[in-house]
Each structure stands twice: as structure tokens, then as C-alpha cells.
Amino acid sequence: MKKILIALFALTSVVNAQTVKLKGSDTVLPLAQKEAEQFNKSGKGKVSVTGGGSGVGIASLIDGTTDIASSSRKIKMDEKLKMQDAGKKYKEVIISKDALSIIVNPSNPVQQLTREQIEGIFTGKITNWKEVGGSDMKIVVYSRETSSGTYEFFKEFVMNRKNYATSVLNMPATGAIVQSVGQTKGAIGYIGMAYDNASVRQLKVSYDKGKTYIMPSLANAKNKTYPIIRPLFLYYNMKDEAKIKPFIDYCLSAAGQQIVEKTGYVPLD
């Protein structure tokens, strides 16, 4: 009986040692869930996945409540310093890329916008769709909340580091933006391409002042003609590398990169 109990304890310890917590980016969430689902079936370990935002994930890595932080932006300087103060050395891994889509309500006749027009809408300089060739209708702007990596990326690479208008409605999750834009005729928002569905419509975007407009698609992201693309990151504490690396290796493997594409993200080159 004693031998059986010892064996069960040893087995439980192994299972617990292989259980890895992943927390963070709402953008990465669907991909991380699919990767974890398949990895867990392999018997090489167990990964549990939750969202909350890139900032929340990195904060959780700093305070030790998660093993892996997923992020749709690079770690910030103040976060690096907090890691250093906590005596933690971290590793950064890019697991895929993501195309960011500008979405509107399907009833909106506008099909395309320049980067400058998008900036104008999100900074509050453009407030009516007629200003960009649409109907005489107020623009309702939806954004992610400030803890979101997508919020940070959009501000830097689409809005040219300009501030969001105070009228912008900040949403706690990407799914909430999709739902709100789908239900509001004059709405506009931005999402990771993997979240696109029939309740909203993606716009073509121009980064050359209206000379060419490109639709967000996997093909256009892979051939690098679509301009709004970013890497997606995983961060982890290097002292935990032994238990985390099997999952990281799986995400980077051919099987893991197939999941990236199937889930609506852009595989690594």
C-alpha cells in the first residue's frame, strides 16, 4: 500500500511539474488555446490558457502567477526593469504574426481608407462618414483598452503615435469590439484578423496615401503587401525553461505552424 501511495505521489508530482500556465494577450488567445489543446493531447505536458491582455500577462509573469506571458507587443522598458528588480531573466519568442484588420458594420458603404483617414477617425479629427466618402452618419469608434498590446500597436503603427480621442469607446476584449461594430451602423474598430466573422466587414487599407488599397487576408499578409502586420510574442522566466520549452518547441514546429495558419494567423517565414 505504501509503495502504491509513493507511486501515486510521484505521478502527481510529474503531472503538476508539467502543468504550465499561459496568460495574456487577447489577440493571441485563440491561437494559444488551439496550440495548447493539441499539445495537451501529445502527452508531453499540460498547458492552461487564459486571456486578460498583454499588460496583464506580463505583470503576471513578473509577480510569478503565470509561467508564460503572451503579448501582441514587445515588452516595455518599465516592464523589463520590474523583471530585473524581481531577479528574473526572461526569454522572448515570436510564435507567429498577425494581420490587424480595420472593421466596420456590413451596412456601411465605405470600402477602403487610407492610414491618414484612419488616424483622423481615431484621433477625433474625422467624425462623420461623409468626410471619407460615406453616408452622412456619425462615426462610432471602438478600441481595445489601454492594457491591450493591440491598443499600443495600433497607436504606434497606425495612428503615428497620436493620442486616441476621448470619445473612443474602449472595450475589454476583441470579441466585444466585433460584437459592438456588428450591432452599430456607424461603428469602426480594429481586430486581429483571426477574429473576423460575417457580422462585420474588413476594409481595404492604403499606406501610400491612396495609390493602392490592400485587403487584409492570409495571402496578402504572407506576401507582405498588407501593411498592418505584427509579431506575436511569448515571454517566460529562463529558470523555468525546462518545463516550458516542450510547448514552445511545439508552437514553432511544422505542426504548430499549421495550427497558426488554420486559426487565421500568419505563420513564420
Image (cartoon, helix red, strand yellow):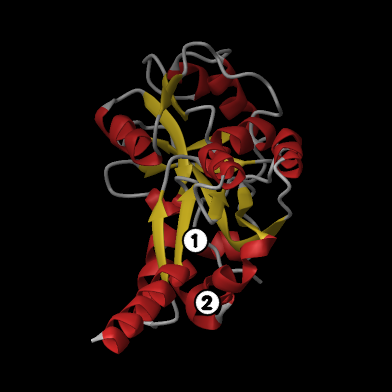
Alpha carbon of mark 1 to alpha carbon of mark 2: how far?
16 Å
Find residue 175 and report its image quarter. Answer: top left
The answer to whether marks 1 and 2 mark residues whose Cβ atoms lie closer than 8 Å is no
Q: Is residue 157 visible?
A: yes
Numbered disc 2: secondary structure: helix
Q: Is residue 204 left or right of residue 198?
A: right
The residue at the point 35 percent across, 23 percent down is: 186
Image quadrant in which the C terminus is located: bottom right
What is the x, y in percent for residue 161? Answer: 70, 26
Label whose residue precedes the other's in the sequence (1 or 2): 2
Q: Is residue 107 visible?
A: no
What is the x, y in percent for residue 108? Answer: 34, 31
Q: Is residue 9 left or right of residue 247?
A: left
Q: Is residue 38 above or below residue 206?
A: below
Q: Nearer the viewer, mark 1 or mark 2?
A: 2
Indicate which disc residue 256 carries.
none
The residue at the point 52 percent across, 72 percent down is: 247
Looking at the picture, which amino acid does disc 1 mark? Answer: Tyr
The residue at which mark 2 appears reads as 250
The residue at which mark 1 appears reads as 265
What is the x, y in percent for residue 176? Answer: 33, 35
What is the x, y in percent for residue 263? Answer: 41, 64
Using the image as rendered, state which of residue 225 and residue 81 is in the foreground.
81
Find residue 211 and report its image quarter. Answer: top right
Using the image as rendered, state which of residue 174 and residue 25 is in the foreground.
25
The residue at the point 47 percent across, 18 percent down is: 168
Numbered disc 1: secondary structure: loop
Looking at the picture, which amino acid does disc 2 mark? Answer: Tyr
